Image (cartoon, coloured by chain):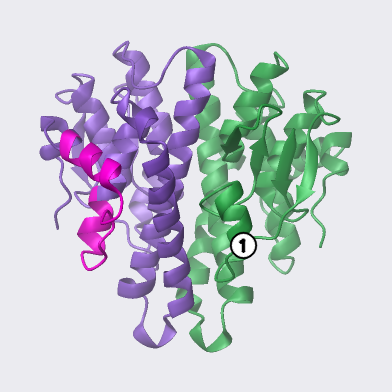
Chain colours: A green, B purple
Amino acid sequence: MKLYGSLTSPFVRTVRIAAIELGLDREVELTMTVVRPTQPNRDYGVAVNPLRRVPALETDEGDVIIDSRVIVEFLNNRANGSLIPRDFDARISCLNRHAIVSGATEALVSAMYETKLRPEERRWKDWAEDQIDKAEAAFVWAESNIADFSAAFDLSAIALVALIDYAGFRFAHIPWLKRLPSVAAFAADANKRPSVRDTAPRE
Amino acid sequence: MKLYGSLTSPFVRTVRIAAIELGLDREVELTMTVVRPTQPNRDYGVAVNPLRRVPALETDEGDVIIDSRVIVEFLNNRANGSLIPRDFDARISCLNRHAIVSGATEALVSAMYETKLRPEERRWKDWAEDQIDKAEAAFVWAESNIADFSAAFDLSAIALVALIDYAGFRFAHIPWLKRLPSVAAFAADANKRPSVRDTAPRE
């Protein structure tokens, strides 16, 4: 299978960590793909994903699956894994945690575009601050709910470590975890896993 | 149950259509909630959703579930519905269609913020055009895949009608469906449903 992605995207990383955890990393080949807002990669848009986003997974049958959560669900089923619980209540709880963490990650990507990619004179400080504020609120929420993230290294936990490291990678000047000892301990623990260490974001 | 939302959000509408289709609309009470980027609704952020986004569903047990897709999955299970297929391959296919449609909707929301909410001197035409281009590509993709959307009025079909109507509502000057006869026929057909008609976006 081909995974279209980059070494910086936290959503691609979620899929890469999941693939390693599921023992599928040899079957999932990362294909470096540049997608940059306002610079349409038309070939990719036509052949793979009309939204011109990563990650996208092309299966051996030639089907394309987009969205990190859908891709992880697909891989998890293929490997008969437990990254998404089978029990319905546990499943909704995991997907809900994932939605909050993933929304915080989207907020940081938006803040990154605002502060780094947009022409300087068109930047809007209020927008970037609002997005960062949302991510901070999600971290505070995670601190209160860390037991649920720590119970199993599932989709929500993978997305949380991807968020934490992305926050540090793109906004290194913000002391994200300073008042969040439980999230910091979670991150330290997660970073002992080869799947997490070997996929750390880099340019 | 309380559904935090608005009459304009296409993601809230997806949940409202789903609730009606599932016969749960009397149990899901819409609670009008204002969320506006750069104007943090802190009460809502603390009490309900740290991301300060709608929709969010508060269950009768006091649990909060966010993200239209997770909420629909929760409601679908509660009503023993068929908005998300049980068969795994059909399920992934539905979730993948939903991801593309939902991503296009996010692109249009971003374009709307760029062209209407952002201070004029900070607007970036290239950004808005790129987002609209992504949505147009998703519509072209939907035209080629319309049979899958028309086979059942599932989560992906609901999200597609929400996208089509949102595009017309926010960007009325763009002839979205002009060269897409199958998507136009799908929209006309979907609009015969009370669930769709009764939830049309309005200010």
Q: Is residue A120 magenta?
A: no
Q: Is residue A93 left or right of residue B132?
A: right
Residue that mark 1 sits on: A41
Q: Residue at x 61, y 41 (%)?
A: A143
For the N terminus of chain A, which image quadrant? top right
* Image coordinates for residue B99, horizontal then vertical, percent: 47, 39
In the image, B33 versus B46, the foreground residue is: B33
Q: Is residue A63 left or right of residue B84?
A: right
Q: Is residue A172 left or right of residue B47?
A: right
Q: Residue at x 24, y 37 (%)?
A: B186
Task: Please tell me whether residue A113 is drawn above or below residue A88 in the rendered image.
Answer: below
Q: Which residues are magenta?
A: B165-189
In the image, A37 versus A143, the foreground residue is: A37
Asked where in the image residue A94 lies, by quadrant, the reply is: top right
* Image coordinates for residue B37, horizontal then vertical, percent: 38, 64
Q: Is residue B190 visible?
A: yes
